[in-house]
Image (cartoon, rainbow, N blue to C red):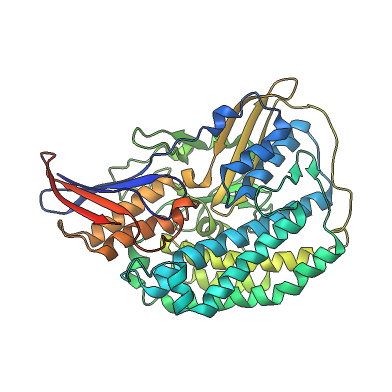
Amino acid sequence: MKKIIIDPVTRIEGHAKISIYLDDDGQVNDARFHVTEFRGFEKFCIGRPFAEMPGITARICGICPVSHLLASAKTGDGILAVKIPETATKLRRLMNWAQIIQSHALSFFHLSAPDLLLGMDSEPKNRNIFGLIAAEPELARGGIRLRQFGQEIIELLGGQKIHPAWAVPGGVRSPLTSENRTHIQQRITEVRNTVINAIVLFKQLLKKYEKEAQTFGNFPSLFMGLVSLEGLWETYHGKIRFVDSGGNIVADQLDPTNYWEFIGEAVQADSYLKSPYYRPLGYPDTRNHCRLDSGMYRVGPLARLNICSSIGTSLADAELEEFRSHENGTVKSSFFYHYARLIEILACIEHIEIILDHPDILSTRLRAEAGINQLEAVGVSEAPRGTLFHHYQVDENGLILKVNLIIATGQNNLAMNRTVSQIARHFIQGDEIKEGILNRIEAGIRAFDPCLSCSTHAIGQMPLNIDIFAKNGSLINQIWRN
């Protein structure tokens, strides 16, 4: 048995490595994605007042703080047992759509476009946002301004682009002004055109990356996310739906506040990342890569487009129909996460344009006041990367006793491991591993966009060390990229 270690994995949030195990014939026997970072938010929040939790948990991530802010505020709504004002709900939705736009734009234009436009086998020193700017200046500029659009909305509502102290238990702190609404409306045409052009470009690239589309996480699984009562695409409120690879609804209108009834959480000894699974079908047999009756599921943009009946806006629904034409049933390849992100950006822009015309969007009635009425609550929202659960237990004074967070990246953990194995089996033959193969293995993880800090394309050579071990454990080869 030989072992290949990719450490660190570049362009993902946090610290991780990939281990690839070869048999004596140089064929891939297994592969593992390990998360080696431990942060401990669920523990150090204990003892804090529940009203502080939106501000605290938003610090989990500097790229998607809004996701935690909103899920936490919704949990606080549950502890207060209040129905927040309709305008507050609309404004929370507006901020969440803006969050999805800026995060998806970052993922596609900054992190994935260098691979897609410059080539998986291109030089690492050029395969980054600066190389993209040099090669495709208009595309890069459009992506930057698209992300800026999302960040501006967050700032106009919350006062700052990162960690806005705006959504609170019971509602939001401040209204949308008429001037800020007009500013947002004036930018819609530009950003809509940017994402439409990007969708056209990606569809043109699909033929070039046909092999990657077939091997980047292309396998049967369940898909999970929120839908409305009518089964429409949903990002802020709704019920849980599971569908299988054939597009059949496995479970529908599940109450997300009772998530433990249908989501189990497994722990693996070689990773700090939990491995949630669909409880009724059980924890998947990771040794059997063809098994269909397992509880592995995927979340995020790919899942949301697979589970919804429609999006509810004209342009995005037209793209959704074409997206679904690529496969029967669901779209199973994780390579199509890129495609799904672009469609979701378009959907968010259309929904923003609609909601800004609501007559009560400028209302200043934004807060419901109450005391501690429930000692336990769950808040659920769709983050850019998938369904996000915040579960709090408090004492009579509202101090946190217990916290459980189920993060989208964790819910994709089993699928990311399966993806790494599939790519490695397809591309690795023997001990000699080219740069482009290393990049494809990492790109398989990046397709899920598992948050950010390491997810950025490095300037210059990306650091990477692969050790290849013989069956007896002796080091027989080293590959360095730094």
The residue closer to the viewer here, 378 or 324, is 378
The residue closer to the viewer here, 107 or 409, is 107
Q: Is residue 377 above or below residue 286?
A: above
- Residue 329 visible in rendering: no
Q: Is residue 50 above or below residue 309?
A: above
- Coordinates of residue 81 in the picture (x, y in percent): 78, 33
- Coordinates of residue 57 in the picture (x, y in percent): 62, 39
Task: Give the quadrant of the N terminus.
Answer: top left
Q: Is residue 42 left or right of residue 461?
A: right
Q: Is residue 257 above or below residue 374?
A: below
- Coordinates of residue 158 in the picture (x, y in percent): 74, 52
- Residue 302 visible in rendering: yes
Residue occupying image coordinates x 53% and y 76%: 139
- Coordinates of residue 39 in the picture (x, y in percent): 49, 35
Residue occupying image coordinates x 87% and y 58%: 360
Residue occupying image coordinates x 80% and y 37%: 82
Q: How many marks?
A: 0
Residue occupying image coordinates x 23% and y 63%: 434
Quadrant of the rendered image containing residue 44 = top right
